Every structure is written in structure tokens, then in C-alpha cells.
Amino acid sequence: MTARTLPRGTARAGRIVRLRRRFLPADTLVVLLLVLVVGFLFIYPFLMLVFGAFRTAAPGLPGDFSADGITGAYKDSKVWGTLRNSALYSGAVQVLCLTMGAFFAWVVTRTTTPLRRLVTPIMVLVFATPTIFFTIGWGMLGRDPAGLINAGYRQVPLLPGDSIVNVESWYGIIGVTALKLTAIVYFLFLGSFMGLNRSLEEASRVAGAGRLSTVLRVELPVLAPAITGIAILGFTAGLSLLDIPLLLGLPAGIHVFPTEILSHVTAVTPSDYAGASALSMLLVAIVIGLVLVQRRLLGQRSFVTVTGKSDDRARWDIGRWKYACTAVIVLYGLLAVLLPVGQLVVGSLQPFFGVYGNLTMANYTAVLDDPETMSALVTTLIVSGVAGLAGTAIAVVVTYAGKNSRSRLRSVPVMGVWILMALPGITVGLAILWAYLAVPGLRELYSTIWILVIALAVHAVPITSRATEGSIAQIGTELEEAARICGTSATRTLVVITGRLILPSFLVGWFVAAVLSAGNLDVPILLASPDNQTLPVKAYSLYQSGDAGQAGAAFCVMMASFIVVLAVGWTASLLLRRLGRGHS
Amino acid sequence: MAAIGIDGLGKRYGALAAVDGVGLSVREGEFLTLLGPSGCGKTTTLRCLAGLEKPDAGEITIGGDVVTSVPEQIFVPPERRDIGMVFQSYALWPQMNVFQNVAYPLRRRRVKRPEVQRRVDQTLELVGLAALADRPVTRLSGGQQQRVALARALVSRPRVVLYDEPLSNLDAKLRAAMRVGIRDFQRELGTTAVYVTHDQVEAMSLSDRIVLMKDGRVQQVGTPRDIYERPRTWFVADFVGYENFFDADIVERAGDRAVARLDGGGIALRCFGGPAAGRGRVRLCVRSTALSVVPADAGTADRPGDRTNTVSGRVRDSMYLGGQIEHHIEVAGTVLRVRGADPDPSGRAVSPGDAVELRIPAESIVVLDADDEAPEPATRGKQDNLDRVGSP
Ligand SMILES: Nc1ncnc2c1ncn2[C@@H]1O[C@H](COP(=O)(O)OP(=O)(O)OP(=O)(O)O)[C@@H](O)[C@H]1O
Ligand SMILES: [Mg+2]
């Protein structure tokens, strides 16, 4: 329209037309490329997992097709017991996590509890502590009479027996898992609680309902869809979790799905890869099914309320209860941060586990002198940094293209990434094994760090898309159009305007993904070979061979190097910003 | 139905006194409006009444029962005050449909099922939503949601209904319609009501009495007509739309009548002294619509010798407002705003530059205390602009 009203042949009209023409095919091209990348990274390994279930040999070795792996895996009556165990374990964990997560979110958003500002930092620490080290810490604390808790218990006179906790038990794994997962559930709840319109509650009070009645009849029902959604997400997370059942459950004879998949590969010779894949398929099917149900539930009823001015008035003064709430916060901080981390630190200084006199640096010397551990540390830092970056980049590009491209294929990559959202780490490792070992050319990646980078990046994408999708959704096309109208080219707009706006959440996504990747055990456990071990794998084997103290030292060294890397990055960004300001 | 008494009510947020010694009494069945600029403490006062906020000072009684008393440490929680409240954001419970929302207060008061059905139907009928009883409230228009909120507040026939800017989220047309609606329901039920708004028209058209607040304090209490025609402070006059203010001295006084001499020009105006008009400094104020303007050379036929309260000036600027015209007229160094019908019924027109005579009827002049605090700068903006026009 406008183009026609402009005088024909002017440079300006010509430029507009040319830009349009050039933009569209490039757009389609980018999307096509994305479809290929996502197909290769996400869909292809998943298909290979199915393929693997029908193979008689290990990945990359010549073999035949047969259904033996599948029948073998499911004929075994143990598998149904495992399924029941998994459901029981994850279900019980959910009950605890939901209660604690909702409780803490409520305390933080709604009450005047004195220490409420500490909750979020505590949760960040719990979230960032690698599960494997959290587990090792608790293993040391409560495995045998030598741990801090039991040792402390014995100091108190007049108490019966010489140990109070044994984490290698049902209660132990459920409790430890609940402590760890509460952090995630808390963050999921925090948003819903902050979004809750306070006047809904006040309207109920004025209408004659007491506090308890208001909670039961108004607040819980309003939050119900969110609670269900979080419960399902948490349940799938519990089903997928490997570290805690592996370290604390197996010694007590408790088998769950991820440990069972692992033992098909590692506990029998020759490894039963087909059986592991067959079990993985069931786990994947359950997880995807649950995620679909969750989508459904959340999509159905939207309780977005009409809000006027925000009515965030004073919090509830819960009177004497606030001391009880403070006590719960302190207790949680103790159990989820101070005790396990403290035990790791104390353990790393003990010459022998459980010896509290003459602390030494012997474990550190051992760790620092061991080339294997040091190379594991370096591998971990590089792999987690690169995988985090790649995972965030994929998430951003896929989400951005899904929202802004005009191509008809734009939602294909989004769906591709999304369908494999919550894949358990162990199955990602297995699928990548099949996908890369079976193909010449790709096979060479095995035993390099790149296979770990790829696997961890794929595994990180659900988290990184969560972290970035909000900021991408907020970027109105208007902002970009405004920039275009002001005469900025399409590419420049993308880089200068859009890139600038996404950058902060990109960095957050990168950071979170890197931290999670660095502590991840279940993805590399099947992929690691002596040449590309990561620290979690190394720590696991140290713990298994009884060198818990060295595992603790490894943890401290890893945390220290993380802090150094962060500090360097932070200083660099500060300097860059200074320089940038100096120029402009 | 119940009378309300508020005495010495105070509520602080940190260093800020949101409500500062408010004392009021609301008669049984009365419709009282709290009016005032943003942040003056209307909502806080209302929330203290509802029991949603604990005041730091004062006492509140509803129907003779003490519901809040800071000195005696009494605090009745909102659910036991037997009140209804309409929230600005409606605050409808999204998981319930229209019927369930409206039935909720009755259920909490343990009313029997058939009775609940009957009264909800009746109330929905009253607000004209009987047909929508089974709709989820998330699928209603803004006006419909507001009526559900209203029905919910009224359904249990509470002793008192509180409204916090219930119409501010609606568009102008719907607001006018709902205003009429609220007045009708309120008349039909005869419940005591306290209504919060910063909209003057809403306050004037709904209320039996208006309480004008500023900075957490009551400025003036009176009927809408009182407030509109006899503001008692500079702030109130400014808030209800008086545009022209002059500093003056009362030079003569005989009973109710007085003569005031304006600063600067030596012009004397007759007026009726209010409580402020002793002898000495005063501030006069007058509405732009009360002034009438005639061209200076219009002859003497229609001004038979009476030049009382007539001053001469010059038109600086005229603005057409659609059906009305506003002139800015400079009189003895100040600029006055004068508003009249356009076209003028008498067929005379003045234009910028003309010398004119201005008549200021004595009964339209309000005499205020000269020591009054100035209104907020925000509300005084128009005045400042005019002064600038006046001083070239
Ligand atoms: N929870 C709070 N914390 C701190 N200050 C508050 C709080 N609630 C209100 N205030 C302050 O108290 C004063 C009175 O607020 P209030 O909400 O009663 O004003 P209002 O007259 O209802 O204004 P509006 O017309 O804008 O709704 C304001 O200055 C406000 O900023
Ligand atoms: Mg208000």
C-alpha cells in the first residue's frame, strides 16, 4: 500500500521491496536448517534408542535384529517391582516436596517470618549443589556410625544405640531426595504464589470465611492447576533421578528404573544394551505421557484473574507461628545445606573417614596430584561451559524462530525440542550412545569431550528454554518493527535490539545450564571413557571405592574453581562495560 | 443496617501517616462517600472498617458493637463483622461460577440450601444476571463481573456495604449505567454504605453525604450540595472545581453581608461572609460558570445603573469547548476564567483583545480563610498555567 503511494523508482521504495524479498527465503532457510539440527540432535537419538532395543549387540558392534532384548527385559518379573518402587519413591518424594515447597513459598510471599529473606538464597544453594555431591554428603552423614549426625548423636549421653539415621533405606532416599527437589518445587511455586491476587483472599474473609476456610476454599482451589502441574513435573523428575537411588538405594537393595537401566549396562557381562534400551523406552513413554497430561491440565482452565491496581498489602502477621516458621527455615537450611556441605568439607579434611582428630590436607594432595582427577576437573569445566552455551543458544534460536518466523515449518523445531522435554538423563546418555557409536564418522566423537558436550547440551535444553522463553515472549514484534522502520537492517535489528534484550536471560540460562551440567552424573555415566571422565563420574567411583574423603576434596576443588571462573567472568564483564561506557 | 462510628482512627506505614486521626459517624441506612485525591487514605480507612487492616490508633463501632479499639485492644476479624465489600479488582473467585460466587457469603453464614438458592436467585435478578448463573466468572465482561461482585456483597444483607472504587475499571458509559444501578440497589435494600472514589461526579450523584479527605485527614463533611457550593477550605474548593481565587481583605461587614477589597486593583466586591469572613485577610473563590461577561461598549440598556460587583478587564484568550466557551480575562493583574454557553443566548460575542465588563454575583462568591494550606501542586496545575498566561 505505502509502497504504491511512493513515487515509483525512488531509491526508498526500491529498498523496501528488496529487503522483503531477501528476508523471506532466508527465513525459511534458517527454519529448515533448524529442523535439521533439532532432528539430528533430538529426534534421531530417540529413534536410535528404539532401534537399539531390537539389536543383539552393543552400540557400534555388528549384530542382528531381534526382540530378545525387549522380551528379556520385560519377562523378568523384577521389572514390575522396579516400576512399583519407582512410583512409590517418586510419589512419596512428591508429597514431601510439594508440602515443603508450597510452605516455603507461602512463608516468603505471605508472612512476616523473620528469616524469610534467607529462604531464596538457601534454595539457590541447594539447587546449585550437584546432586551427586549432595548425595555423597548425605551418604557420609548418615550411612554408618562414623557420619557427623551419628557421631554427634553418640556424644549425647543417655541415648540408646550408637546411630540414629541410616540413609541407606527407603526413608533415607525419600528424605534426601525430598530435601534436594524441594528447591526446584519452591521456585516453581514462588511464581504462582506471587501471582495470587490478594484480594481474592480478602473477599473471602469479608464474606464471612475464617483464615483456614479461606485457604481451603479459595486459595487452594485457585492454585489447584498450578499445584497439579508442579506435582506432575516433580514426579517425572523423581522418576528420572539416578544419583540418590544409585548411591543410597542400591546398597539397601532398592531398585528403581534409572538404576535398573544402568545395571543392565554395567552390572552384567556382556552388557545388555538392548534390555537397557527397552526399559528406557517405557520410562520415556511414561515421562512423555505425564508431561502431556500436565500440558492438558494447565491448558484447560486458566485462572488468570482480572486485577486492577496491585493490592499487595501488608503480609499476614502470623503471631507466634512465625517462630515456628523460622525454626523450619533454620532446620531446612541445616539439613539441606549446612550438614551435607559441612560433611563434605569435614570429610575432605579427615585422614580417615570418621577420624575427627588431626585433620590433614592429605585428601587434597591426593586429588591435586592425581592426573585423572585433575583432567576430570578440566573436562567438567570445559564441557559444562560449552554445553550450557550450546544448550542456551539452541533454546533461544528455536523459541525465537517459533515465535517470529513466517515459515510454515516454524513450530516443527519447537515441537521436536518440546516432545523430548523431560527425558531422564540416563536415557539421553544411552540414546546418544546408539546414535553416535553406530555411525562411522560420528563414532570418532566417542571418548572425546564433544560427545559429552552434545549430550549435556541436549539434556539442558528444557531448562534453558524455561529460562529464556519469558524474555523472548516479552519482546514485542513492535519493538523490532520500530527499529526496522527507523531504518535499521534486519540483521542489525536482530543483533542490536533483540540480542540486547535477550542477553540477560541468555546469561542466566547459560549459567544455570552450566551449573547443572557440571554436577550431572546420569548423562555422562554411560558416555564417559577414561579419556573424558567428568568430576561427578570420578567422584562416584571414589565414593564407591571408599574414598569419600577424596570425593569431598574433589567437591571443594570444583566449587573453588567455579568461584574462580565466575569471578573472572564477572570482572571481565565489568571491565567490558566500563570500556563500553568510556567509548560512548 | 447499622450506624458506624469512627473515632481518632490512625494508621501509619513507616513514617507516613496514611490515616491521621479520622473521626466520622455514618447514620443507619446512609450512603457516605470518602472522596479525595490519590493517596489521601480513603482505601486505608475503608480497609480498617472492614478489618483488613489493623489501625494503630482509634476506635470503630458498627451498629453499636466495638469492632476495633486500639486502646482496649479489641479487634474483630473481618469474617465476624457482618459486612459486604465490593473490591476495585472485583476479586471474584475464578474457580467458581456466578452462582457459587454469590452463594459463598450465605454458605459461610450457614444458611440452609433452599434459602441460599432463593436468595441468590433473587439477588442475581436484582443485578440483572439471572440468566448467567452457571457461567464461569472468567467468561464475563467487565460490567458483568462488577455486577457479580455487587451481588456477592449484597446477598447476605450485611449490616454495612463497603465499596472501594468499584467503577474505576469500567469504561465511561458502563460507569454511568452502573452508577444508576448502585443507587437503585442501595435504595431498595437501604443498607448503610461507605463508598470510596476519587471521582467527583460519582460522589455527588450517589451520596447522602461526602467526606473530603486529604493526607489522611478529614477536610470537610457535608451533603453533595454543601461541598459543591460551600467548600470550606482552599483545598476543597480547588478539588470540587473552583477555578478563580483572589486574595482580599474584608473591609465592611453587616450581618451576613460583607464587602471585600481585592489585592492590587482596589476593586471592592460584595459577598456573603461565611464562617471565615470576620474582618481581615480572606481568600475569595468563584466558579468560572458563575461569572458573566459583557462587552464594555454594549451600552447601558441591560445594565440599569447597577455596577455592583462588576469589574472591567480585557480578554486575553478564548477557547471553544463544544457548546461552551471559556475566556481568560485579565482583571487588575490576575487572569480569571469565565465559562459561558456558546453561542451566547443574548447573541453577543467577545473575542481576544476586547475590553469587557465582568459580573461576579455576590451569592456565587465563597469566602475562605486566607491561611488555608495550598492545594497539592498536582491539582493546582491549571491555576499555575493560567498565572503564566497572565504574566507575559
Ligand atoms: N501497604 C502499604 N505500605 C506502605 N504504604 C502504604 C500501604 N498502603 C498504602 N500506603 C500509603 O498510604 C497512603 C494512603 O493510601 P490509600 O491506599 O489509602 O490511598 P487512597 O486514598 O485509596 O488512594 P487511591 O485513590 O490512589 O486509591 C498512600 O500514600 C500510600 O502510598
Ligand atoms: Mg484506593
Image (tube, rainbow, N blue to C red):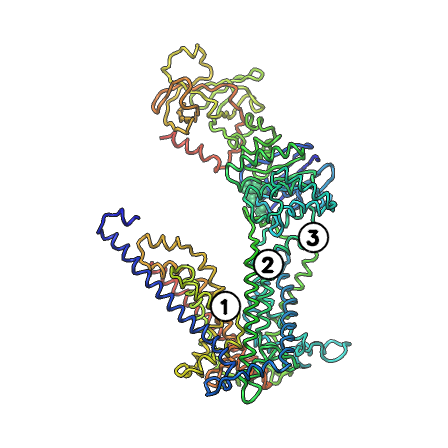
Give the mark nearer the N terminus: 2 vs 3: 3
The residue located at (48%, 22%) in the rendering is B290
The image quarter containing residue B304 is: top left
Q: Is mark 2 within 8 Å of ligand 1?
A: no
Badge 1 element? helix
Q: Position of residue A314 (x, y in %)?
A: 61, 50
Give the mark nearer the N terminus: 1 vs 2: 2
Kind of residue at disc 1: Ile
Res A361 seen here: no
Kind of residue at disc 2: Pro
Q: Which residue is mark 3?
A: A213
Label 1 marks a residue whose chain is: A
The extreme left residue here reads A9
Checking the image for residue A225, the label placed there is 2
Residue at mark 1 to residue at mark 3: CA–CA distance: 40 Å
Checking the image for residue A419, the label placed there is 1
Circles 1, 3 touching at the beta carbon (< 8 Å): no
Badge 3 element? helix
> For this rendering, which residue is in front, B282 or B99?
B99
Q: Is residue A491 left or right of residue B25?
A: left
Q: Is mark 1 within 8 Å of ligand 1?
A: no
Badge 2 element? helix
Q: Is residue A288 above or below residue A206?
A: below
